[in-house]
Amino acid sequence: MPAGAKPAAVKPAAQAKASPAAKPQFGLPPQATGRAKEWKKQLAAVDADAMACRKCALCETRTKVVFGTGEATVPLVFVGEAPGRDEDLQGVAFVGRAGQLLTKIIEAMGLRREDVYICNVLKCRPPNNRDPQPEEVVACIPYLERQLEILKPRIICSLGRHSTYALLNRKDPIGKLRGRVFLYNGIKMVPTYHPAALLRNPDLKRTVWEDVQKVRRILDDPDSIPAEAFEEVEPFRMKAELKRRLDQDLGI
């Protein structure tokens, strides 16, 4: 280089923009797209019933009914226990700290939040985020049952002991139920801990990661787990029996 000459400026390499992930395909039936409008209409009808619901005292303290979030043709449904403060204010499921963590879990699974459906057993927030009461679950679970009947997902992931216990005819602690594969009305179901539990105890993150990896494997290949590994259960249908069982101490 001649004396006094300035080196040519080096242009910084252009950063490649990360292309958005393609929407996963899980082998939905061909008629799913055509029936999407019908399913949305059916969900909207259940939503309207929930909005007008006054079957328990939570209708007196709620700000908004939190029905569910997601498309009608998704193959995966996450079910939590009840809305919290942020959800009650916004009317959207899982938008608080636990919801933000759930979104990160979904993304770590290689999915997007819009690729799943998210809802709760209770559609109204219990005061001060207390545990759901038996009479509240009895009043509200028909809405969840109707949601699942319409959605007919490939798999359900229940979050925490209250949602797991409301869906399964089992009273075992969540630590004994998590990671196992049950059949709820013919739908595969994998319980795991609620994201709020991870905020309190980060050591549970590895356990939850194992559980959602199993969920993802079932999404990718429904035959990846042998049928004999499924545990068929009888969902609660008798409200009196549900109330009696929920009155018992569930543990964790």
Image (cartoon, rainbow, N blue to C red):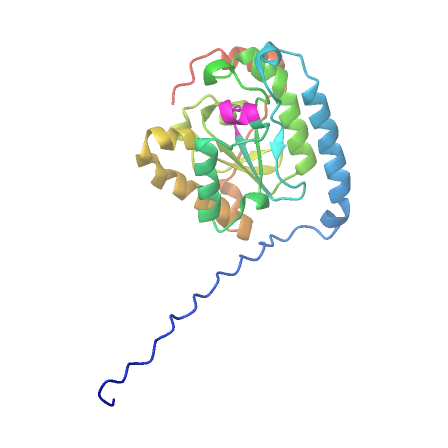
Picture residue at 43% right of the left edge, 69% below the top: 14
| Residue 148 visible, this angle | yes
Magenta-highlighted residues: 80-89
Can you give x and y, in whole percent of width and height, for residue 62 in the image?
A: 58, 16
User: For this view, does 46 lie left or right of residue 21?
Assistant: right
Q: Which residue is drawn at 68% across and 22% down?
A: 50
Q: Nearer the viewer, residue 47 or 31?
A: 47
Is any atom of residue 193 visible in this view? no
Return the residue nearer the eye: 121 or 52.
52
Looking at the image, residue 171 lies above or below residue 71: above
Is 84 colored magenta in this rendering?
Answer: yes
Spot the residue most to the front.
4
Q: Does the magenta stretch include residue 124?
A: no
Quadrant of residue 79 within the rendered picture: top right
Q: Residue at x 57, y 12 (%)?
A: 61
Please give the count of numbered marks on the rendered protein: 0
Residue 67, image x, y percentages = 63, 28
Horizontally, residue 164 falls left or right of residue 205, namely right
User: Residue 39 location, x and y as percent?
Assistant: 73, 38
